[in-house]
Amino acid sequence: MRVRRLSRPPRFVSWASVGGYEESRGPLGEKLDFVDKTDTFGQKTWELAEGEMGRCALNMALTKAGLSHDRLELLVAGDLQNQCVASSLGAGSFGIPFLGVYGACSTCTESLLILSVMLSEGCATLGAAATTSHNSAAERQFRTPVEYGAQRAPSAQWTATAGGAFILSSDYGIISCERKGSVELSEVAVGKIIDGATADGSNMGGAMAFAAADTILSYFEETGNDPAMFDHIVTGDLGRVGSDILRHILGEKLPKAVSRHTDCGLLLYDSEIQDVHSGASGCGTSASVLAAHFLPALERGDLSDILFLSTGALMSPSSVLQGRNISAVAPLIRLTHRDNEKTEREEPSNE
Amino acid sequence: MRVRRLSRPPRFVSWASVGGYEESRGPLGEKLDFVDKTDTFGQKTWELAEGEMGRCALNMALTKAGLSHDRLELLVAGDLQNQCVASSLGAGSFGIPFLGVYGACSTCTESLLILSVMLSEGCATLGAAATTSHNSAAERQFRTPVEYGAQRAPSAQWTATAGGAFILSSDYGIISCERKGSVELSEVAVGKIIDGATADGSNMGGAMAFAAADTILSYFEETGNDPAMFDHIVTGDLGRVGSDILRHILGEKLPKAVSRHTDCGLLLYDSEIQDVHSGASGCGTSASVLAAHFLPALERGDLSDILFLSTGALMSPSSVLQGRNISAVAPLIRLTHRDNEKTEREEPSNE
């Protein structure tokens, strides 16, 4: 791995989160920018509903920033549907120059990573990333239509009907000066694909834990940073089973990191009252939790520095049927609170 | 769109192409680095065969450059299989930090574009891009298994069983000094998603022609460059139908560009003796033609400057069944011959 401190680290101009019925009932329900309790988002199919979710999220992020879509010079987006059509037919339909990514549930971080590098390199001044997943679209594509009522294993997770959109810029002048703080995407690291040591499609969290551990351990080994520097080390959707495995590995190899770990898959739902088994999954999980929870806290200064890793299980229904293990990947970004009043005096590092 | 001249434009260290039976019979058959006429690449399923193709291609590119895989700090890869498993389980299995992309048949250019920006920004010194497609895997996923013998429309194209891998670096010292010339990836431009104005899954080339036209016209409008500066303006897999549409549009709006246009989908097979209807398609088409034909010619200096656009049809079997038009996207890269003897005196532009 190679951790890269960006030469012109971009900052978040605005963001928005969306969710469906189950998400509205969870601990972050009130914080989601838009909720459709019917899960349909006004569309006739679940697949189109997911595309519309992405459109809604991006549209709201634009509205919050007071920007028209034609100001955006780049959109990096992905989702869980075959051929990523939710993104290309949804948020992609705005006519913004488009890069499609596929990182399974790591898509939120992967798209923010690629976007931030493109902005830092000057390929665009203002760009966006968008990520969605939809429970009903994912269930019938990866498992069985929900109407079949198939029983789920205790280690299985609940694919979130949720999404997030993020607008970033390396031109800090675009960020509203009314805000006290802003959030900088300062470092990126691309994760390796790690064998999840299981072919059990009902235990994605377990399969992804090893990739998350590899990225976290590599990050601290390479940078020499202390885990205590960070408020949180956030993983995407390991859920309860995967989080337990990750914490066990960290406990042996980097004990100081254990208490810093938190997982978006454990924050989106209340497992006491919601029947979500091991927790939330789907790339909309980390996207919506980042937009509804972590970014506002970082902007306010309640959090000052976090490492954010979404975790992706790289498999297809065919590859599982053909007996291949589930592989996983966990890209990493570092998100840091910046005081807007100090911006003038701070020069972006030009390492 | 925004055309970006990279601050530290990377150069190609090495590359390799692979193909199957039909590709071996075509005009470029002799130039492919590796061919398996059984199309199986030693695997039990077509899906695994595609993954193995990507491994072969990357392995050969590494061998040509005398590099071990652990020297690579980044791999950007994609393919046509659901959830891009050919890449994650194939070339991704080398354990190189991995970014998965989905751009349908635009994946070759998209992955080279992202890789080059990552290298230019300093996220890695040495990185690779890999792209594959497999006829038999694609037919049963997108249409029907080939064993069914379904009749194909005249506008349909033949998904290539082919792939390419490319190793690039911004550190020109890595490039063998025995070679007279090298190839620089100097400019990138991300294309917009354009409605293909058809929902006919047997006419992908026609649907993609509009996206190619949009990118080409935007490039020349923004840069003010003259089409005569380029030996070729290469599209990925428009085939005969799509190429005719593109040339018609260019003929009206930028007549000087028409004679420069050529299409990888028309170069891979000999339509006189091969039953490929409108030509080659699949993201392996542009990857293998770039590696087997254009890069060697650029390295030798037989070509000095080309614009290279792969073209991707953004749809899924579900989206077509649900009546959505096929959208398309065409990212662009500029590939330029550089004389190695002059390298020392040339400073990478730092615009």
Image (cartoon, coloured by chain):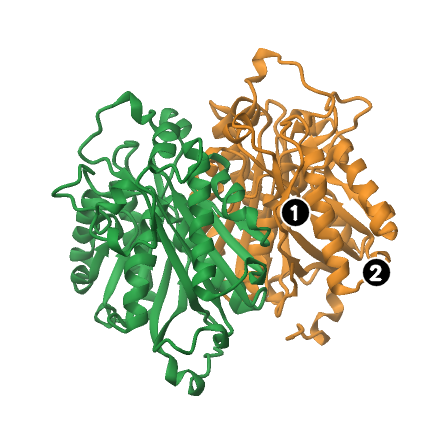
Chain colours: A green, B orange
Q: Is residue A58 left or right of residue B335?
A: left
**Nearer to us in this view, B104 or A318:** B104
Do marks 1 and 2 share a subunit?
yes
**Image spot of residue A17 (x, y percent):** 36, 53
**Nearer to us in this view, B306 or B318:** B318
Chain where mark 2 sits: B
Q: Which residue is mark 2?
A: B226
- Tell me if I can see residue A224 in this picture: no
For this orientation, the residue located farthest to the top is B148
- Res. B219 mark: none
Label 1 residue SS: loop
Q: Is residue A95 left or right of residue A61?
A: right
**Image spot of residue A115 (x, y percent):** 49, 60
Label 2 residue SS: loop
Q: Is residue B124 above or below residue B328?
A: below
Q: Which residue is mark 1?
A: B330
Q: Residue at x 56, y 32 (%)?
A: B324
Q: Residue at x 47, y 54 (%)?
A: A59
**Tag 1: residue type?**
Ala
**Image spot of residue A258 (x, y percent):** 17, 59
How far apart marks 1 and 2 lie (CA) works out to: 20 Å
Question: Which mark sits nearer the N-terminus, 1 or 2?
Answer: 2
